[in-house]
Image (cartoon, grey):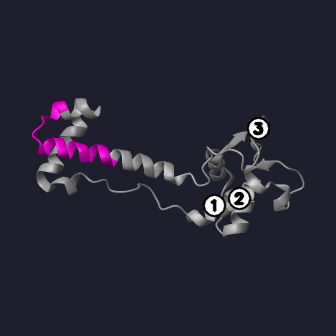
């Protein structure tokens, strides 16, 4: 049994800064990196030296060298990113939104006897709602959606 406990640190639905699905954050980061590589390609096409590209974009000379080599062989298309790395998420965005809402509804609303979330309980709710088994360790990632660790 996991002893790490999670409790809601704010009133549900009252924190406009809390994303309901954390994945767009990663997408925005990939988009920023993509924009930087495309800007480098524009500078290469304009004849700007690699050292100046690195200085303007605030990146290492080695990164610019790799981008330049790709750009020389394949043009702007060659500096595009490869997309998200790692395995595909096991939960669809819609499923993650359902789980998030269930957690916001509270532990009692999900059939538990007290209003306290544990990693084990979160794993149970995820499996109950989605059919996807989750370990308590994996459930620790729920902290990224606005949950705070409670003292032990």
Camera-nearest residue between 15 and 105:
15
Q: Give the image quarter of residue 148.
A: top right
Q: Nearer the viewer, residue 129 or 32?
A: 32
Label 3 sits on a secondary structure element that is: loop
Residue 149 left/right relative to 61: right
Query: Circle 3 is placed at which residue position?
Result: 150
Q: Residue at x 61, y 45 (%)?
A: 144
The residue range painted magenta reads 34-52
The single residue placed furthest to the bottom in the displayed view is 131
Gap in Å between the C-alphas at discs 3 and 1?
23 Å
Sequence order check, earlier mark of 3 and 1? 1
Residue 97 - label:
1
Magenta segment's dominant SS is: helix
Measured as percent of width and height from the top left, residue 90 is found at 55, 64
Label 1–label 2 contact, CB within 8 A: yes
Q: Identify whether 74 is placed above or below 60.
A: below
Q: Residues within 10 Å of mark 1 (few under 14, many from 20)?
A: some
């Amino acid at each position: 049994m996991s002893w790490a406990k999670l409790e809601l640190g704010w009133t549900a639905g009252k924190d406009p800064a809390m994303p309901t699905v954390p994945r767009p954050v990663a997408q925005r980061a990939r988009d920023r990196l993509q924009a930087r590589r495309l800007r480098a390609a524009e500078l290469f096409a304009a004849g700007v030296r690699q050292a100046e590209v690195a200085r303007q974009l605030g990146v290492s000379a080695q990164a610019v060298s790799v981008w330049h080599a790709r750009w020389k062989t394949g043009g702007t298309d060659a500096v595009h990113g490869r997309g998200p790395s790692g395995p595909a998420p096991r939960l669809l965005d819609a499923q993650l939104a359902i789980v998030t809402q269930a957690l916001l509804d509270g532990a009692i609303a999900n059939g538990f006897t007290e209003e306290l979330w544990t990693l084990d309980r979160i794993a149970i709710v995820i499996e109950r709602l989605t059919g996807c088994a989750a370990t308590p360790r994996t459930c620790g990632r729920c902290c990224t959606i606005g949950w705070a660790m409670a003292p032990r």
